[in-house]
Image (tube, helix red, strand yellow):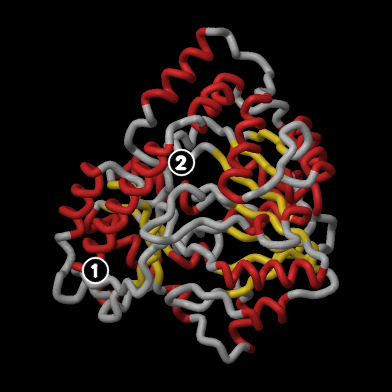
């Protein structure tokens, strides 16, 4: 009966990231694969959620106060004038907000530009909508945007550009110049933009998150998507939002209602409490994650990983396998699980450059099999345990005890 599946369903396979997380659970391995915290969410927002449940906010619900506060934050952070009554759609996490945004604007045959490497969900949503993903490779090791590559990828069929900053998996924060380049292309070609800004409050040192919508001429053509998940360590609550011009926000709300009807009511109430957290909370969030980033950078550098680029934001480190190691990313991760009991994600799953293009291009894409993503949104205890296990690897080479020829 498998032939009864739709063409779209047949084209999808299980998420390798979630499969690795499940493997970590089965093997009692330390999970540095999936980007969810293993430490408690802030007590004050858990109390708010429990209070909302006990107050019987348990039915379909729209919390207008949440939209009001998001509009106020958009003004304060980015100088954006957002109408909370018309320009915001509350969804079940950023994932649904992004999917609904794609379904709202993409028709069959429309091209959508993405920056490679990129998070796996984007391509799937575009494909489901009938769109055609077009990937623009960022240049390693600092993952810089080459304006010429972007210009060469845009055509009369380009409907939108997707931007994730701070970025998963690299931790890159797109610079003001890069944002101006993207904005210029959007204005010249009359393209829309969809941004994923879930790591907006997690930037390090002097880096500052700038929303693409804040660039001149971009608010009227940008759909911002974000969520509560990463900032408040509640990835299971599924409260996210889209901020967009009224006609697009209306379309997103209509799609959201047809698919899920309502984001979880008690968690919407708690989300308002979360977003009202004092500035000290957000400052502490940055400090804590910067400390975790520095810890894992030092750890991996100590066993030979090449770390030419230190994450500027997000909760991920994209590390290059030691030059002395002949393993590919997939082989390395498998042996990492076997020998150290630590799970990470092979980098190739984030690269989407067409294989046929690799054959005809003069550019060397071999680096795509040399990166591994580590999530450092873990407790100090978990990171210390990972350090102890990774210490079993050879410090001399930074590689694993087995050589590929021995497997």
Real-space Cα distance between discs 1 and 2? Answer: 27 Å
Q: Quadrant of the C terminus?
A: bottom left
Which residue sits at x=15%, y=70%? Answer: 395
Tell whether 310 sits left or right of 116. left
Q: On screen, 321 above or below 336?
A: below
Does the image show residue 127?
A: no
Q: Nearer the viewer, residue 207 or 146?
A: 207
Q: Quadrant of the N terminus?
A: top right
Element class at badge 2:
loop
* Residue 269 screen position, x and y as percent: 56, 22
Tell whether 76 sits left or right of 4. left
* Residue 297 screen position, x and y as percent: 28, 62
Does the image show residue 186?
A: yes
Element class at badge 1:
helix
* Residue 326 screen position, x and y as percent: 31, 78
In the picture of the structure, the residue carrying the numbered disc 1 is 301
Which residue sits at x=28%, y=47%? Answer: 30
**Are discs 1 and 2 less than 8 Å apart at CB?**
no
Q: Residue furthest bottom?
A: 362
**Local crowd at mark 1 within 10 Å, few (<14), some, or many (≥20)?**
some
In the picture of the structure, the residue carrying the numbered disc 2 is 231
Camera-nearest label, 1 or 2: 2
How many numbered discs, if any? Answer: 2
């Amino acid at each position: 009966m498998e032939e009864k599946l739709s063409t779209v369903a047949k084209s999808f396979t299980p998420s390798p990231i979630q499969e690795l997380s499940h493997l970590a659970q089965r093997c009692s391995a330390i999970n540095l694969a999936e980007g969810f915290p293993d430490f408690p969410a802030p007590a004050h927002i858990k109390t708010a959620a429990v209070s909302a449940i006990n107050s019987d906010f348990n039915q379909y619900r729209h919390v207008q106060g949440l939209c009001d506060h998001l509009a106020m934050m958009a003004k304060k952070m980015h100088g954006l004038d957002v109408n909370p009554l018309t320009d915001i759609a509350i969804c079940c996490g950023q994932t649904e907000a992004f999917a609904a945004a794609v379904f709202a604007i993409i028709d069959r045959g429309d091209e959508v530009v993405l920056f490679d490497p990129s998070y796996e969900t984007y391509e799937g949503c575009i494909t489901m909508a009938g769109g055609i993903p077009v990937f623009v490779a960022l240049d390693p090791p600092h993952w810089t945007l080459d304006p010429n590559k972007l210009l060469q990828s845009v055509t009369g069929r380009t409907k939108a550009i997707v931007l994730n900053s701070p970025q998963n998996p690299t931790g890159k924060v797109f610079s003001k110049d890069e944002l101006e380049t993207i904005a210029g292309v959007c204005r010249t070609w009359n393209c829309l933009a969809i941004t994923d800004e879930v790591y907006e409050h997690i930037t390090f040192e002097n880096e500052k998150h700038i929303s693409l919508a804040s660039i001149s001429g971009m608010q009227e053509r940008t759909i911002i998507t974000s969520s509560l998940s990463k900032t408040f360590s509640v990835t299971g609550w599924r409260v996210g939002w889209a901020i967009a011009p009224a006609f697009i926000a209306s379309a997103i709300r209509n799609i959201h209602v047809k698919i899920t009807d309502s984001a979880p009511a008690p968690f919407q109430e708690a989300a308002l409490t979360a977003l009202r957290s004092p500035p000290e909370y957000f400052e502490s969030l940055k400090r804590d994650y910067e400390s975790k980033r520095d810890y894992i950078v030092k750890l991996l550098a100590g066993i030979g990983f090449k770390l030419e680029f230190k994450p500027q934001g997000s909760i991920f480190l994209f590390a290059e396998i030691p030059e002395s190691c002949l393993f590919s990313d997939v082989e390395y991760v498998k042996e990492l699980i076997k020998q150290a009991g630590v799970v990470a994600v092979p980098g190739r799953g984030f690269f989407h450059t067409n294989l046929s293009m690799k054959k005809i291009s003069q550019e060397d894409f071999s680096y795509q099999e040399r990166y591994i993503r580590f999530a450092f949104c873990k407790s100090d205890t978990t990171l210390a345990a990972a350090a102890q296990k990774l210490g079993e690897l050879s410090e001399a080479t930074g590689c694993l005890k087995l050589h590929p020829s021995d497997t």
